Amino acid sequence: MAFVLIHGAGFGADCWDALIPHLRAEALAVDLPGRGTRADVDLCTVTLADCADAVREEVEAKDLRDVVLVGHSFAGVTVPRVLDLIPDRIRHVVLVSAVVPADRTRVLDQIDPEVRELVEQSITDGVYRQTREGAAAMLCNDMDEATAASTLDQLTDDSAALLRETVDLSGYRRQIPRTYVHLKRDQCYVEELQQRSIALLRADVIDLDTGHMAMVSAPGQLAAVLNTLHG
């Protein structure tokens, strides 16, 4: 068995660094295009299909099977595309406060209108750029000062496709077991939105009393959830 970890918007694979040592199986954290090891890719060109293909590429390169696919936040719209590309390699899907809008809509379509306007103002030429102050309020409410600072240091620009592109959730129709990790103190993907995602997915639900970046603020707790899937 192996864990394959897909980051959300504004981060790269290094957001999983604190979690990986707690996992009881091989772990592969993937950089999506434009981030980390794929920073040479122009973010303005990146699509959701490109993100899924990056995951497929790394899983196949390592010939990983019996995979627990873990998606955080905006990875909720990349995961179903991965499921369609390599379904036979996936044993379980875990979605950590993952964004799952209605099929054939945009992520922006389910955000509060006032927040949506602010987010759209943060998009320039296909790139989404979060401010440090805004990210601190949404992502770091359960962190001490040092942990918050190191998390904000990892912030990176992102492809606006994660917000604006029409999503394809057909992969979620596959009969692959899935678990939704509901984060009770999340100030980014708030309670109402998490509950909408849970209802759409009809997933098993596990609660954690953390903010949005549980892999950073409570890596041991999140790892304990994931390790229950270690067979």
Image (spheres, rainbow, N blue to C red):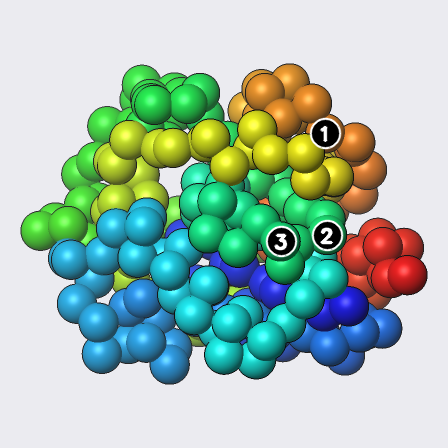
- The residue that label 3 is drawn on is 88
Q: Are marks 2 and 1 in contact (CB under 8 Å)?
A: no
Considering only order in the chain, which callout, 1 or 2, is on the residue closer to the N terminus? 2
Above or below, comparing residue 159 to residue 59 in the picture: above
- The residue that label 2 is drawn on is 91
Residue 205, image x and y in percent?
Answer: 78, 32
Considering only order in the chain, which callout, 3 or 1, is on the residue closer to the N terminus? 3
Which of discs 2 and 1 lies nearer the camera? The answer is 2
Residue 125, image x and y in percent?
Answer: 9, 51
Which of discs 1 and 3 lies nearer the camera? The answer is 3
- The residue that label 1 is drawn on is 203
Which of discs 2 and 3 lies nearer the camera? The answer is 3
Quadrant of image for the N terminus: bottom right
Tell me which corner region of the image, top left, top right, bottom left or bottom right, holds residue 119: top left
Q: Amino acid at mark 3?
A: Asp
Residue 20, image x and y in percent?
Answer: 71, 74
CA–CA distance in space, label 2 to label 3: 8 Å
Q: Amino acid at mark 1?
A: Ala
Quadrant of image for the C terminus: bottom right
Residue 21, image x and y in percent?
Answer: 77, 79
Tell me which residue sits at (22%, 78%) in the image: 40
Q: Amino acid at mark 2?
A: Arg
